[in-house]
Structure formats: structure tokens, C-alpha cells
């Protein structure tokens, strides 16, 4: 039993970290695109389309999104169960969330800084990597922290549809076999992971602000 508990814990950490990395990798650039498109009259319609897609995917409850993605997950990952299949679903759910958080952070950049970068003649890539990202880096760390904590919850939900991890362990042993000590362990570990993420992300964000 202890072996299964340890395996479930590592599966949960694996799903959180990999899907969090992928969601950040794709979510922040999408947030940059949303921010730039929102400031462009020429691409205003394209922004409306992207904005709508982000809102739609963020509005779908995760468990329903998993069910909707079953055919896609099967084709891409070759299976619909296990941690790897769950990572695909978690990433699809998390990218729009991260993109919206990033866009909101970019919108908080003072207008004076943006005008100064325009007056200096920075091109688009220079503006992104010398102004936009550095100015919002502490907020982006906070965004990633919020994302990872949300993924902790999502991995537990994914356990209901065969993703593995602590969520599935709690269902298989706690719900079906009435081993409530296993459920308690799963809750303690999930809460502990969230607290560690919150502490680490908050501290790193504060250090960057200094």
C-alpha cells in the first residue's frame, strides 16, 4: 500500500509540473499576442476571435473538457487514461487560463513606459523582451503560482477519469473501499503541495519586485 501511495504522489507532482511548464510555455506567448492585438486597430477582429476562444475554453468545467477531448487525447497520446493523457488535458485547460492572467499583467504596464519604448524606436521583439516581459516578471511569477495551484485541483479531478495520482488513489481506496485514512493522506499532500507552491512563488515574486 505504501508503494501505491508514493507512486500516486509522484504521479501528481509529475502532472502538475509538466502541464504547468507547457501551459506557461504556450500561455505567456498567447497572452503577449492578445495584448498586442488588443492595441492594434488593424488586427482588432483577430483579437476578438482569440479573446472569444480564450473565454470559451476558460468557461468549460474541467471534467467536461476532459470528456470533450477524449477523441483528440486518444489520437494524440494513444490513450485516454494515465498521467500522460491527463497532462494533455491539463495543458489544454491551463493555456487559456495562463494567457488571460498574462494579458491582465501586460495591461498593467504603465502607459508612460509603453510610450517611452515607442519613442525610442523599439521594434516589436525588442518591446516584448526588453520592456513587456521584464516589467511584468514579478506578476508573471505570481501568475504561474496561481496556475500551478489550480493544476493541483485539476489533477485531483482528473483522477476521477483514470488519470492516476492522488485523486484516483482517493477514489479507488477511499470511496470504493472506505479507507478514509487514504483520503486524508491525499488531502494532506495536496494541501501541502499548494502551500509550498504559494510560499515559493510569493517569496520569489517579492524578491523580483525588490
Image (cartoon, rainbow, N blue to C red):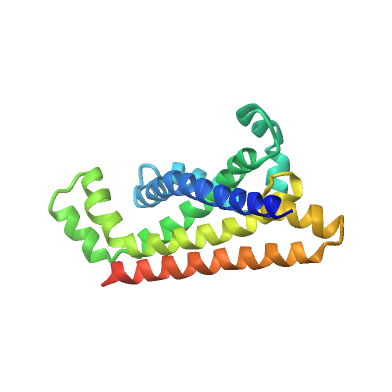
> Can residue 61 be seen in this snapshot?
no
Question: Eyeballing the image, is 147 above or below 110?
Answer: above
The image quadrant of residue 181 is: bottom right
- Where is residue 42 drawn, in percent x and y? 35, 42
Residue 110: quarter of image? bottom left
Q: Residue furthest left?
A: 120
Q: Is residue 154 left or right of residue 52?
A: right
**Foreground of the two, 135 or 146:** 146
Quadrant into which the C terminus falls: bottom left
Residue 68, horizontal then vertical, whole percent:
71, 40
Quarter occupied by residue 157? bottom right
The image shows a total of numbered marks equal to: 0
Along the horizontal axis of the image, is 149 left or right of 167?
left
Residue 197 drawn at (x, y percent): 49, 64
Q: Residue at x 27, y 49 (%)?
A: 128
- Asked if residue 180 shows in the view, the reply is yes
Question: Which residue is rendered at x = 62% and y = 43% of the image?
Answer: 89
**On the rendered structure, is 69 left or right of 135?**
right
Q: Residue at x 42, y 45 (%)?
A: 25
- Locate residue 158, reporting x and y percent: 69, 49
Q: Nearer the viewer, residue 198 or 172?
A: 172
Amino acid at each position: 500500500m505504501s508503494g501505491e501511495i508514493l507512486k500516486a504522489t509522484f504521479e501528481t507532482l509529475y502532472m502538475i509540473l509538466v502541464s504547468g511548464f507547457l501551459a506557461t510555455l504556450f500561455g505567456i506567448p498567447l497572452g503577449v499576442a492578445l495584448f498586442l492585438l488588443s492595441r492594434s486597430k488593424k488586427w482588432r477582429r483577430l483579437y476578438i476571435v482569440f479573446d472569444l476562444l480564450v473565454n470559451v475554453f476558460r468557461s468549460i468545467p474541467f471534467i467536461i473538457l476532459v470528456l470533450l477531448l477524449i477523441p483528440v487525447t486518444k489520437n494524440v497520446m494513444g490513450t485516454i487514461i494515465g498521467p500522460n493523457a491527463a497532462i494533455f488535458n491539463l495543458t489544454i485547460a491551463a493555456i487559456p487560463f495562463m494567457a488571460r492572467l498574462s494579458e491582465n499583467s501586460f495591461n498593467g504596464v504603465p502607459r508612460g513606459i509603453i510610450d517611452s519604448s515607442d519613442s525610442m524606436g523599439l521594434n516589436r521583439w525588442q518591446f516584448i523582451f526588453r520592456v513587456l516581459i521584464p516589467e511584468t516578471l514579478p506578476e508573471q511569477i505570481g501568475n504561474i503560482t496561481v496556475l500551478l495551484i489550480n493544476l493541483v485541483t485539476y489533477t485531483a479531478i482528473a483522477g476521477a477519469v483514470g488519470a492516476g495520482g492522488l485523486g484516483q488513489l482517493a477514489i479507488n481506496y477511499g470511496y470504493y473501499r472506505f479507507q478514509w485514512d487514504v483520503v486524508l493522506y491525499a488531502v494532506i499532500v495536496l494541501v501541502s503541495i499548494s502551500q509550498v507552491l504559494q510560499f515559493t512563488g510569493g517569496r520569489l515574486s517579492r524578491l523580483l519586485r525588490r
